[in-house]
Amino acid sequence: MVPGATRLASCLLLTFVLACGSTTGPGPSPGGGGDNARVAALTLSPNGATLLVGETLFLAALPVDAAGEVLEDVQVEWSAVPAGAVTVKDGRLEGVAPGGAVITARAGSASATLTVVVMPHDEDSPSSEEVLTSAHEAGLINDEELLAYRVYAAFSDPRLPIQYKARVEPGFDATSLEDLRQRFNGLSAPMKAALGMYMLRPADPGSWLNAPTPDARLSSMNDTHCRPFSGGWKYIPDPISKVRIWYQVNYPEQRKRAIRLDAAIANEIWPKLMALGLKEPLTDEASACNGGGPQLDLYLVSNMAQRGLTTSEGWDIKQAPTYILLKDEPDDDNALKGAATHELMHAIQWAYKMKGDQLAYGWIRDALANWAIDHVYPTLLVGPNDKPRKQLEHIFAGCFTNSPDLPLESRAQGHCTDGAAGNAARDYGAYLFFQYLEKKYGPAVVVAALTKLTTETSSLTAVDSVLPGGFEKVWPEFSKVLWNATPISTRPESFKAWDNLTEVARKNELNADLSGWPEASDELHDELDNLSNRYYRMHFSDPSTRSVLFHNGWFKNITEAKDPVKVFAFWKDEAGAWHDEDWSEYEYVGFCRDMKSQRVQDLVVMVSNAKFAPAGGGTLTAAKTPYLKRNNVGCWRFKGTTRSVLKGKTWSSGRKLIDTNVEFQVLGGFEDPDFEHPLIPHTKRLGGSILMQPAGGFTLDVDYVSGGCRYSHGPTPYPLLPGGGILMLNAFNELTSPDPDTEDWLSHPSRSYTAALADPTLVQLNVSGGTHCQGPELDIPGNILFTDAGAARPVVLPTGELSGQYVNLDTTYSWILQPQRQP
């Protein structure tokens, strides 16, 4: 044992009954070196280390005098031998290259050493959680060891076996320590002895920070309740503040950060939260474990993987006083302030006597705590100064926006998009829902939701009861704002406008182009969790993608089952203007991309399910599978030529020829982008291309011989008379109609069509030949085009062209019609 360590150990044991240090306010700023001559011994914490390359660990050197009293005004010198594997400066240890080193701390005549091992690190290697979970699944470690190793990893405890050393994902709350508290009473005696130090407040003697080395004397102490204060810790004396900030004296700069944090809590965090009408955290003055005063105790903790943890005092699961562990952030005061706000909100939550177990309200607790950060600090930037800084709560927004298809209350991990969020649960990003409520309805509704938990065991029922119109009204509105991309992000009511949030909702991308195919169809999801959303984005760029049909498979859920489902759409036209539509009560919605007014370029479809079960969970299934179908069937105008060749059975030679240059076009009203067909209910922008009227002209050329006489006319051009023909298309045969004639036509296969042209104009045929050939002879053009007799309708060719030939009695009809795009 190093010189003086025996005396220090005796002091630590005595402090289980009597205090070795003082709880009074700080003296001079530590670290100057004025007490170096009095140093009798140094103790390093932690007393050993395994680092990954690039990982940082903060070492604390606790100096004591010959009487075992902790000294503050001590300057410690650090060195590492051999050089190369690590760097150490002012106790900040960083792994540089694989290898090992002995770290020495010196102050006056005293010194202490520890050994550090540096292991290689690959960014793609498994995380600590993944390594430990795999070991547990393989039977290498049992349930208790898994719990212990998670705690050790989160607090850089040297007892973690080296084979399980891996990167620890950052996060907000130290959930491993929370799990330990919940399970502690059920652990085996040896495991209680090993982990009991983590059940103590950091300043208590025997805590993991005051006794980092496994020690038989500590292991034998089964009572993990708090004990009188030990040396090495002090707090910022502030008689007005409701929060007492504790720091370790052997971290020279920690006192300065504690002073700044104390000011931030007193002047910013506490007043802004209390102004909402929230309850103050409960005082722990009636508890023996009260840190020496009635204030809420907050401890700055080094080498803590997560940002903090609010721990209840005692075992009451509904309401209790608390204390806070806060990760010390040497390089980022903003991160300290944000984390303190988050944890203070947790302490406030513990002040409410909940109807159920506090921790059972997990998702809303975390969501409200991150919401509090935004409320207190709307633009709190964190991160290294040499990199783009982010608002603290934004780091967790992606955990939610990247998983919109999960229920609001989900606490699933693995969805965060920002590496700084690590493996945080999704609910840390659910603050977005409460931020939306505050911006839309004011903060009172957020506070009301928290207060309602005192009478409701279901957090969802509690929230629903305070929302204006309940989830059924509010959730669909929120789903649109959550999109946070164009066009929502350009609006005043958007997370982008409110808070400069750049995270957008995860979407399913569909390439809506045909890419040479005549038609295509994509099914969308037919299941949707309660209180969740799905987003789809379709991009159109191919001009040959002409007719588009969206089938709302949720139509019957909405109109018959009255499920609280909404189907919204945003679409951008060719001019770049965005249209916002509610498709919930349309079974089919279409676009004719040949029409300028309907030439959709981008389409966003979002499906929102506002249903919820008090206990959470639940799924809705669509009555029919939704899908997006599109094809190359023209829907605005066809242009081309037709030919009719009549050879009468009594004619000895010649023919009657009619050539047209014709255009078939939809009726003008059908070009309206909001058109709803009166004979095809529950549809939007569909059915317009069923009927197309012709325009153009034809050339009549008659020259035939019959009965020895020659009959001739022209060739002479004529205009097509109005109402002289029709083209009927059936681009999609899913549609139905209560009108029998319309229904009959819609029952034909998709892509089928029929057309006819006729003209009743009287013309005079020249008659020549023998004396019996007298003229003139009256005639009419008659049938100009006839595509079928109804038995088998022609279909649009894979090229999108309408072309073919049809023989009816003694007439042959042929046609070539090309689809057109409206300029």
Image (tube, rainbow, N blue to C red):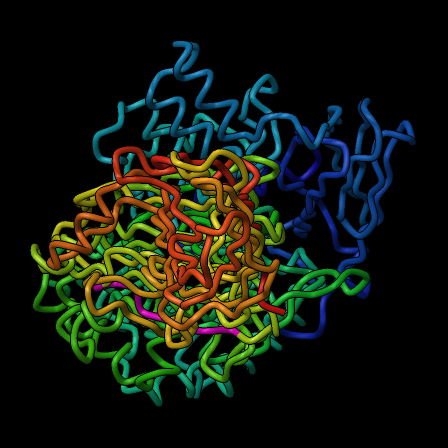
Which segment is the magenta one? 578-585
Residue at image point 92% right, 31% down:
83
Q: Position of residue 184 (x, y in %)?
A: 27, 36
Instruction: Name the residue furthest top.
Output: 139
**Vertical placement of residue 323 versus 135, above or below:** below
Image quadrant for the C terminus? Answer: bottom right
Which is nearer the eye, 749 or 286?
A: 749
Q: Is residue 761 magenta?
A: no
Q: Residue at x 40, y 17 (%)?
A: 136
Q: Is residue 297 left or right of residue 188?
A: right
- Seen in the image, is 666 located left or right of residue 300? left
Q: Position of residue 426 (x, y in %)?
A: 40, 50
Residue situated in front as seen by the camera: 653 or 756: 653
Q: Quadrant of residue 166?
A: top right
Residue 598 in view here: yes
x, y percentage for residue 542?
A: 62, 50
Residue at x 29% of width, y 47% of height:
225
Q: Residue furthest front?
A: 771
The image shows residue 70, relative to residue 260, as above or below, that is above
| Position of residue 350 measured from the top left corner of the image (x, y, whole percent) | 25, 65
- Please state the total of marks drawn on the protein image: 0
Which quadrant is home to the N terminus? top right
Above or below, comparing residue 290 to residue 711 in the picture: below
Query: Could you say which quadrant of the image residue 465 lies in?
Result: bottom left
Q: Depth check: 675 or 762 in front?
A: 762
Residue at x 78% of width, y 35% of height: 95
**Secondary structure mainly formed by the magenta segment:** strand
Name the foreground residue: 230 vs 712: 712
Residue 642 visible at all: no
Q: Is residue 580 magenta?
A: yes
